[in-house]
Image (cartoon, rainbow, N blue to C red):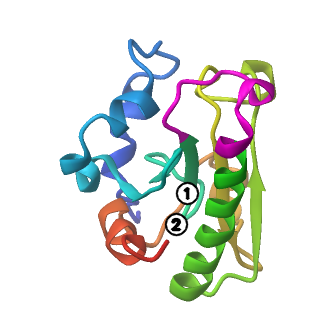
Amino acid sequence: MERLWSPWRHDYIANPGQPQSACIFCEAQKNPAADSQNLIVHRGLHNFVILNKYPYISGHLMIAPYSHLGELSSAPKDVTDEMMDLVKRSQNALIDVYKPEGFNVGMNLGKVAGAGVADHIHMHILPRWGGDTNFMSTVGETRVLPEDLFLTYQKLSGKI
């Protein structure tokens, strides 16, 4: 039997559905000196770009405002303008590094819409390739990623 190794998912698997005591986005942004540990690949004026700790695919990025905003409709225009600019810059970085064939870009607003962090808005951007879904995702409810998060961080840091 083959083994799939994804140690970064241990916390997620070991504590499914556990309520977070603090906002992951607010905690991650607190100490710029720890950006590499917190997987923040870029800091803008109003938003930052961070790797998803539990990615659906290699290169899965999220853009989140520094402000703890639970509703997209309450976000100031300068925050949402920069968020979309960072989506475009992230897309260009992902094209440069990974050469994907397409992208998924979007937000899940509210718990019933699939938001894992429902009280701090964030935009997802995922590179996609033809055939990147396989039987592991479909049947085994497991994702297979070809690289670890810190290699992804090294590839994308300074590119956005």
The answer to which of 48 and 21 lies nearer the viewer is 48
Q: What residue would you read off at disc 2?
A: 58
Vertical arrangement, residue 110 with respect to residue 45, above or below: above
Where does residue 25 sit, x and y in percent of width and height? 45, 33
Could you tell me which secondary element the residue under label 2 belongs to? loop
Q: Are marks 1 and 2 in contact (CB under 8 Å)?
A: no
Q: What residue would you read off at disc 1?
A: 61
Mark 1 or 2, closer to the camera:
1
Could you tell me which secondary element the residue under label 1 belongs to? strand
* Left or right side of 73 for 68: left
* Mark 2 burial class by Cα count in 10 Å: few <14, some 14-19, many 20+: many
Report how far apart the C-alphas of labels 1 and 2 lie in the structure: 9 Å
Q: Amino acid at mark 1?
A: Leu
Q: Which residues are magenta?
A: 65-79
* Left or right side of 119 for 76: right
- To which quarter of the image does residue 22 belong? top left
Task: Report if residue 13 is visible in the image.
Answer: no
Q: What residue lies at 73% left-to-right and 23% top-to-bottom?
A: 71
Where does residue 52 sit, x and y in percent of width and height? 49, 49
Vertical arrangement, residue 85 with respect to residue 130, above or below: above
Q: Amino acid at mark 2?
A: Ser
The answer to which of 74 and 154 lies nearer the viewer is 74
Q: How many marks?
A: 2
- To which quarter of the image does residue 137 belong? bottom right
